[in-house]
Image (tube, rainbow, N blue to C red):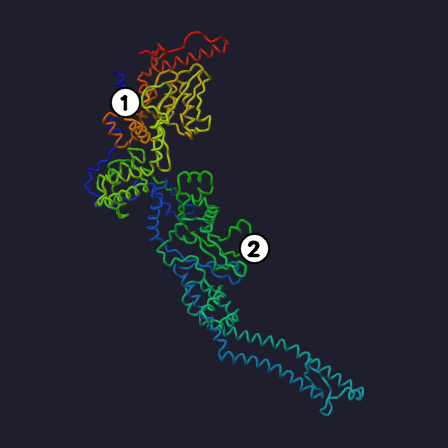
Amino acid sequence: MKQNNDQNNFKLAVESLYNSCDLSQLSFKTTADIKDDCEHLGQERAMGALKFGIGMKHDGYNLFVLGSTGLGKNTTVKKLLAKESVTAEAASDWCYINNFSQQHKPLILKLPAGYGRQLQNDMQQLLEDILIAIPAAFESDEYRTRTQAIQDEYKQKEMMAFKDLNDRADKKKIIMLHTPGGYTLGPTKDGKVLSPEEFDKLDEKEQKEIKKIIDEIEKELIETIHRIPVWYKENRENIKQLNREISEVVVNQSISELTLKYIKLPDVLNYIDAIKQDIIENVNDFRRLGIEKESEDNRQTILSAFSRYQVNVLVDNSQTTGAPVIYEDNPSYVNLIGRIEHIAQYGTLLTDFTLIKAGALHRANGGYLVLDARKVLMSPFSWEGLKRAIHAHEVRIESLERMLSFASTTSLQPEPVPIDVKVVLTGSRLLYYLLKEYDPEFGLLFKVAADFAEDIDRSDENSELYAQLIAGLQKENELTPFNKKAVQRIIEHCARLLEDSEKISLHMGSLLDLLREGDYWARQSNRQEVTETDVQQAIDTRRYRLDQIRERVHEQVIRGNYLLDTSGEKVAQINALSVIQLGDYTFGRPSRITATARLGQGKVIDIEREVHLGGSVHSKGVMILSSYLANRYAKDQPISLSASLVFEQSYGMVEGDSASAAELCALLSALADVPIKQNFSVTGSVNQYGEIQTIGGVNEKIEGFFDICNARELTGDQAVVIPRSNIKHLMLRADVREAVKENRFAIYSVQTIDQMMELLTDRKAGVKDKNNHYPQRTINYLVQKRIDELNKLRKFFAADNKVPEHNFTRKNELKS
């Protein structure tokens, strides 16, 4: 009776197994009656960091929003940035324009919001107008008259030069004959050209005089002929000047309105002036192609030929209110930095400044860029490109081939775009601290960490605020209102998700999923409000959808394929509890642990570790057992013990130390030769001093053993032993609580390994007296006795003696 009374001290009342939510102090009937003014519940720290980071304008104060997936980080960031961007200064438009002096280096043009598309349309219209105006001007009667006058002047000058020379030759009786081979000079007499025979009959003096005159005239003729190209060049220059004058008149007429329109934008005026000069220099192209502009197809072809006059609107903020907020879901290098596209023409790839495309950094210029840190890091070169742009305050568009020196062909080198952008990265805590540790530039560029909380304390005040949060989500997602009991059940379930009855989960993704599924079941039942039954059905059906593997595992136990006793007593054998996690679904699985103890050198062998099926944490737990045994039973002597521990029928990885208490109990049972009750299952980790420590998954572990016992029929003596520190984590299923209430199942909590052994063996653990001895027939006495016997055996064998004949059995010690 005394032993049973001691056990009752460790037995938990049903009230300890579940922390019910009570909202009776609130007056609402459904969430439709609640004001949904609870925003960012429990995220005061993160919101303060976000507002600080957004408001800080100095370099490096970009943000990293950290927390687990589903906390609502992205939603919160979107709402906050949307609110902040409205009051921020409007972002500019950015355009690439042709560099008429170096066409492979396009220039960037910054314009007020809306002016980029406007300038592009104006340039398009200007080009179309000039393609019509210039050919018309050069086909006008005025141009033809002036051109003819210049041509006539040239011809008149040439004709007069030869006429004057011919007149002077006539006076000197020399004739100028124009032949296909050029000009020929010959002497005349009495108006007739002298033949060679007649010239030879002249006296020598007269011949010399005629030759002298011919040489002089020939010299003048040569000089005149040499002046003809000069006159022709002057003629061409005069025509070119005329063309320039006509072109200037036409262009000035076309751009005068544009000049007035953009008078306050000097960069645009400079660009218009450069276009004007280029059109005038290349007016013949407009004359030639303008005449051909008949059909629509010809029109587009001709316009594409003059693409150097177009405006490439890189970023258009005409429809943006305030600062832009850009979310790039695929942050590849080209999607972040931009790209230069090419077109195939006659087997050759061609490009120009009109094929430059913007990246997310361009679109977010003057505002905010939100990126998923994991996606950025997984995209090749994106992380380095992002850091380079933030550090340099500019975006330089260049192909990866050129950046990596894989290609040396001539390509565009666009002018870098200066940027002023606030970058917001979202990601997990692990990713944040890894970057902080291994990337020296990360801390310089992302100085603000917004850490989202995972939970809040489950106080009456916070429960009321959580009800307001549920009401807000219900209205925002247009769901059926939830009644008070449904809200209470939701809060209880959120505590269960967190494995802590004193906390409430802030995982907005899971909460919203539960609300939507509860709404679904209410609509299926044609109810006007979501009830507790609907919420419970949503919880149960979600578990059922993922429950097949758990059922199969438990079926193997029930059918006897997986050995597990739930009644009787056995030495060195114990039921331990473990958790299997599959994605976001976890369930408990009881496991059998056995131990052996024999003469050895003080080593406890973890068989899982020996075959590489044990994780490092599990191996650590086993090593702690060795330390516990040596500290408690062999402080002043070596421990001549060799022991083995194993999870029976375990064929996969074993990790964690939550079974270390069970392993120690099995080992103590093996040493003391005391049987352990198999109707008990235990969980808990143990330290070197025998204290039972907190473990995770306590609810799933208890429910896992309960399901096995329930399938085999509850006898009333089946129970689970958990650490005392895990009581606050209990949020057990209703059927488990009902069985405990009816004394068909029990849950015990302990603080030390001694208390656990007393429950498992119905035998006192024993405390040393003043002589440093344990009371006889206690567990610690038997363990100590066995270890002393093993030490004697070791000394005996070390002396190379025969095995002693005395009996080391402890049957008499085990008698009650």
Would residue 639 be visible to someone looking at this image? Answer: no
Residues 694 and 599: in front is 599
Name the image quarter holding residue 499. Answer: top left
Residues 664 and 205: in front is 664
**In the depicted structure, whether residue 6 falls above or below residue 736:** above
Label 2: state its secondary structure. loop
Residue 9 position within the rendered picture, expressed as x and y whole percent measured from the top left: 26, 21
**In the depicted structure, whether residue 111 falls above or below residue 435:** below
Residue identified by numbered label 2: 409
Q: Residue at x 40, y 25 (%)?
A: 648
Would residue 413 be visible to someone looking at this image? Answer: yes
- Nearer mark to the viewer, of 1 and 2: 1
**In the depicted structure, whether residue 139 falls above or below residue 676:** below
Residue 746 position within the rendered picture, expressed as x and y whole percent measured from the top left: 27, 25
Left or right, 102 with respect to 495, comes to right
Residues 592 and 184: in front is 592
